[in-house]
Image (tube, rainbow, N blue to C red):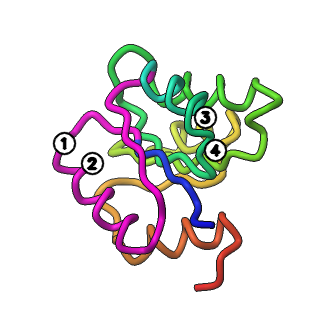
Amino acid sequence: MSKRILIVDDEPNIVVSLEFLMKREGFEVAVAADGEAALRSVEEKKPDLVLLDIMLPKKNGFEVCQTIRANPEWQSIKVVMLTAKGRDTEVAKGTALGADAYMTKPFSTKDLIAQVRQILGLAG
């Protein structure tokens, strides 16, 4: 059974490339363009991993991550935060809220795939 990944980003060009990349790797992919849609999608689709942008409409990525971590039914969901904000304070905040990994944009697609596979416990 393939792993499910939820891509949460409000920039269409990033969503298209991430969606293509993840599908090419054999993952089932769902997409949400804002924080509220992300939480609805987590509820409906129960993804294995969420690729989560921080700068989002309605609810930011930090709020989404915090909500996911606060729900006992969602404890197994992995969260990788993707952001243009790479300052130490943002990384620390994302980690403190329970993100499993943190990647700054622009990122290498090879590194992202490696990170996703490692977090999901899949061999490289």
- Locate the N terminus by quadrant: bottom right
Q: Secondary structure at mark 3?
A: helix
Picture coordinates of residue 49, whole percent (x, y): 58, 51
- Residue flagged by tag 2: what amino acid is it? Val
- Residue flagged by tag 3: what amino acid is it? Lys
Q: Give the mark nearer the N terminus: 4 vs 3.
A: 3
Picture coordinates of residue 109, whole percent (x, y): 35, 71
Which-is-in-front pick, marks 4 and 3?
4
Mark 2 and mark 1: Cα distance apart in space: 5 Å
Toward which corner of the image does residue 119 lie, by quadrant? Answer: bottom right
Which mark is on residue 12?
A: 1
Q: Give the mark nearer the N terminus: 2 vs 4.
A: 2
Mark 3 and mark 1: Cα distance apart in space: 26 Å
Q: Give the mark nearer the N terminus: 3 vs 2.
A: 2
- Residue flagged by tag 4: what amino acid is it? Ala
Mark 4 and mark 3: Cα distance apart in space: 9 Å
Toward which corner of the image does residue 98 lie, by quadrant? Answer: top right
Mark 3 and mark 2: Cα distance apart in space: 24 Å
Q: Which residue is mark 4?
A: 99
Q: How many marks?
A: 4
Which-is-in-front pick, marks 3 and 1?
1
Q: Which residue is mark 3?
A: 93
User: Where are the magenta residues, as a range?
Assistant: 8-35
